[in-house]
């Protein structure tokens, strides 16, 4: 955990009311978003009670936030309508006041978006295989991960997203289509079902 603070990014919100400009900046430990559209899918921030409350209100009102950090150039993002907010409290030894923790999740990431798209926080082939197997009820084996990842990429079904402290992707495809891929790959010998071992 040495120098863990160097991995933090930031979330900034600025609001002008008449002649007064209010600016709030919080530390962020994780973020997922789409660079092209500016759509945010997940952010995790920590800070004081009032600042975290203000960022939460801005997200619920679909206000524009600036998000940036290591490997993530600053840009404006919005969560869209009906973002889900999850709040928590972190008690830190030696501090009189607790630290507030807020995680905001878009409706797409929560499962209310395109049923043919799945947003994942890691681009690891093993993780992608596992999550698709669970989400779509696919009969997948762990040793198929490299083949499956290659097939998704070759069919342009894997798109990288902007991420802070993660390597997010969005995967598109339907269960019948992916089952067809699996059936064809088994027939071609690209993937195999191991023979059961006897003892």
Image (tube, rainbow, N blue to C red):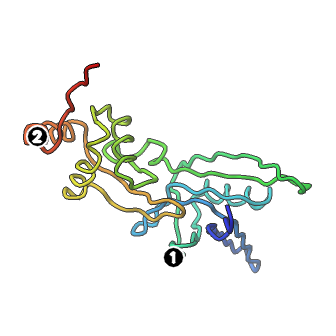
- Say which quarter of the image contains residue 7: bottom right
Closest to the observer: 108 or 93?
A: 93
Of circles 2 and 1, the one toward us is 2
**x then y, percent, for residue 66:** 58, 71
Q: Residue furthest front?
A: 199
Closest to the observer: 22 or 41?
A: 41
**Disc number at residue 148?**
none
Does 70 sit left or right of 128 as displayed?
right
From the viewer's perspective, is residue 41 above or below residue 191? below
**x then y, percent, for residue 125:** 34, 51
Q: Tell me whether circle 2 and circle 1 mark residues in contact (CB < 8 Å).
A: no
- Few, some or many residues within 10 Å of mark 2 (<14, 14–19, 20+): few
- Few, some or many residues within 10 Å of mark 1 (<14, 14–19, 20+): few
First reached walking from the N terminus: tag 2 or tag 1: 1
**x then y, percent, for residue 95:** 89, 57
Does 18 sit left or right of 65 as displayed?
right
Q: Residue furthest bottom?
A: 19
Identify the residue under disc 1. 73
Q: Circle 2 — which element? A: helix
- Say which quarter of the image contains residue 64: bottom right
Instruction: Report how far apart the C-alphas of labels 2 and 1 lie in the structure.
Output: 41 Å
**Disc number at residue 184?**
2
> Which quadrant holds the C terminus?
top left
Does 106 sit left or right of 57 as displayed?
left
State the residue at coordinates (62%, 56%). Answer: 44
Q: Circle 1 — which element? A: strand
Closest to the observer: 69 or 48?
A: 69
State the residue at coordinates (39%, 69%). Answer: 36
State the residue at coordinates (67%, 52%). Answer: 102
State the residue at coordinates (45%, 60%). Answer: 167
């Amino acid at each position: 955990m040495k120098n863990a603070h160097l991995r933090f990014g930031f979330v900034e919100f600025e609001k002008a009311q008449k002649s007064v400009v209010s600016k709030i900046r919080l530390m962020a430990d994780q973020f997922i978003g789409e660079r092209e559209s500016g759509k945010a899918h997940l952010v995790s921030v920590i800070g004081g009670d009032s600042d975290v409350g203000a960022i939460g209100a801005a997200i619920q009102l679909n206000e524009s936030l600036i998000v940036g950090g290591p490997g993530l150039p600053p840009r404006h993002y919005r969560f869209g309508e009906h973002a889900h907010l999850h709040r928590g409290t972190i008690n830190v030894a030696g501090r009189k006041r607790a630290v507030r923790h807020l995680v905001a999740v878009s409706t797409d990431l929560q499962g209310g978006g395109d049923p043919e798209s799945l947003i994942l926080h890691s681009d690891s082939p093993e993780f992608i295989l596992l999550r698709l197997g669970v989400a779509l009820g696919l009969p997948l084996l762990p040793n198929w991960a490299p083949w499956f990842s290659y097939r998704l990429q070759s069919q342009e079904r894997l798109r990288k997203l902007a991420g802070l402290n993660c390597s997010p992707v969005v995967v598109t495809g339907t269960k019948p289509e992916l089952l067809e891929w699996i059936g064809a790959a088994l027939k071609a010998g690209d993937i195999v079902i191991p023979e059961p071992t006897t003892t």
